[in-house]
Image (cartoon, rainbow, N blue to C red):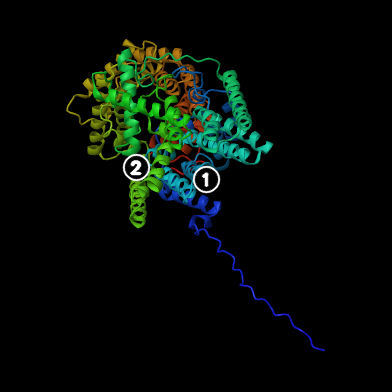
Amino acid sequence: MIVMHKKKKYYAKTVPAPVPVAPTDPLRLFSPLFIAVTMVALAFILYGRTIGYSFACDDRAAIFDNRFTVKGVSGIPGILSHDLFYGIFGEQVDCLQGGRYRPLSLITFALETQLFGVTPKIYHFTNILLYGLTGFMLFCVLRRLLGRIRGGGGLLIPLVASLLFMAHPLHTEVIANIKSRDEELALLFSLIAFVFSLRYFERHGSIDIVLAGTALFLGLMSKESAVVFCVLIPLSAWVLLSADRRSIVLVSASLAIGTLLYLIIRQLVLGTIHAHTTDLINDPFLEATFAQKYATIFYTLLLYLKLLFFPHPLTFDYYPYHIPLVSWADWRPLAGLLANGALLIGAIAGIRWKKAWGLCIGAYLLPLFIVSNLVLPIGVFMAERFMYIPSIAFCLFAAYAIVQWIPAGTRRNATVGTVAAISAFGILFLAYSAKSFDRTRAWKDDFTLATTDVKVSPESVKSNAMAGDEYRRRADTMSNPIMKREYLTRAEKHLRVALAVFPRYEIGCILLGRVLQSEGVYGDSPRSRDSIYHASADAFRAVFAFSPHSSQAQANLGALFAQQLWNPDSAVTHLRAALREDEKLSDAHYNIGTVFLMNGAGPDSALAHLARAVQLDTGNADAYNNLGAAYQYRKEFGPAMEMYQRAHRLRPRQQNIIENISKLYAAMGDARQVPHNQKPWRRVP
């Protein structure tokens, strides 16, 4: 049987078409943890040396001199139930329109005080850490918003923008000035609210929408400027994500609820506060006409743009008249009006067309509008810290230009475009970082800040007054008579400049009087000591022309008559007038008690005032010493010894305290008495 085999058919083997493989993006290897560590590390590189710095500017008012924060945790109820200024002054003051309710940053200070005591290192460390976390949260927000950009821009643009934000020198005031933590927390919690909102747009999780409103509420409890994110978050979703209307409405409602809750609490705590001030420091437009006010406002808006691109020189002081009052005849306010008007038109058009650049301009103008003085007075012409939120838009604009626009301009040679973009970023980042690092030196302490920035703001009332006071304080600690006289001369010079700018400046008059008083005490002046003391009295009296009920002027004038001019009757008259206005002036109680004690007018009155002085100021060694003398005068040796011991613990090497203790032992017939000239006295247990 013949078997027939079928001939096999051979077919060409089908080879599958190659699948295109996307080039590996090295940024995808960077985990969120890596980005977070990078931002925190950069923050410590730029600002790490501030950890060794002291308090500066208004840090003491927010922490050391705040009756609530120094109590630690027990002071938190007081922080939540009072205006910011109540903790500083002990009463409600109406120096700024609307008051200031920003409890969250003060609560963090109270917690740090409870755990570590009043230590500047801890507060500075926390500020730096918060800054690094803010940089990371900014990256997360921009990454989610811009993730759809092709060609790696969805990763590169957020990273470049975040790095430029971290390096920008305009932020040095926020980070190096501890008190400005309210700015940090406001932005940090607002960005957290942004992240949860974006997560809701992606996943529609109910918890995300609740957390978004809660985070924004915490941002508002830090500072009112966080309110702009009620608009920016839903607007960003509409422009960049094309989110559905229902999701945008739900997110907007959550953010609105958080805002409404804050406003209700604020109204319940503060009520309605209308500012009543005749102080140029709190009302920079006090001497301006209507036209000058708005011309100056648009001039400052032009300066903000300049400082974003070229942040030099920097200063903490943009008070009158570092920023001069200008008229519309000046080209600068016109330029500011045109520039910002063009930006406004561009923002409106770009947002209508759903363009990222339109949203970017809007994100700059909206937070700037709140602090521009156009609607609400903010108590200062301008400030670098006010650019903390608006600067995000500038950094995003710069990142777009570097990542997309520069390479697009060199399409024929991709290598050239890449090198140009990297070079542009490197130059800008390194220049900003170097400026930020250098600027932090000015924030070492009050003396360094005042004497550095008065050179940048030589026409300012605030800088000159602060520099004068700091030179006086530094002179008081010097043993070299030549340097002491030099510093007192500088102090007088700066204070006279401040008063030349604003003669009705109460603090300036009082500080000038104190400087002249110190010049008379230390002697070696070309003027006679008596003439210097009378010039000091004239400086104090000058206050009464515009503030007849000034307790500080009365108290200082009384101290001058009590200590240098030795006119007991005049001293008592002025000191009593001071105490009628403010019974809590510890120095006034000390001086009037000392006058009564030395004049023999009444040991009982002396004892009452000195006891009140140490009650108000437990660190006044001289008051304890004189209170001990008052008790000793009444033959009450036990309380006298207790007061001397407290004085000695405060100043263990002060000779007159040692002598008083020795004399008291002798009066008590105690064999432990020692010669008056023995030094140092043994430490009293």
Residue 410 screen position, x and y as percent: 33, 51
Can you tell which quarter of the image residue 325 is in?
Answer: top left
Marking on residue 439: 2
Q: Left of 544 or right of it: where is 663?
A: right
Marks 1/2 in contact by CB < 8 Å: the verdict is no
Q: In this view, does 254 lie to the left or right of 328?
A: right
Disc 2 residue type (three-letter): Arg
Q: Is residue 145 left or right of residue 430?
A: right
Q: Is mark 2 on a helix, strand or loop?
A: helix
| Kind of residue sitting beneath label 1 | Arg
Determine the residue positioned at 56% across, 33% down.
107
Query: CA–CA distance between discs 1 and 2?
Result: 38 Å
Q: Mark 1 = which residue?
A: 148
Using the rendered image of the protein, determine whether residue 665 is visible from the camera's viewpoint.
Answer: no
Give the crowd class for mark 2: few <14, some 14-19, many >=20 residues within 10 Å: many
Looking at marks 1 and 2 on the same chain, the residue that comes earlier in the sequence is marked by 1
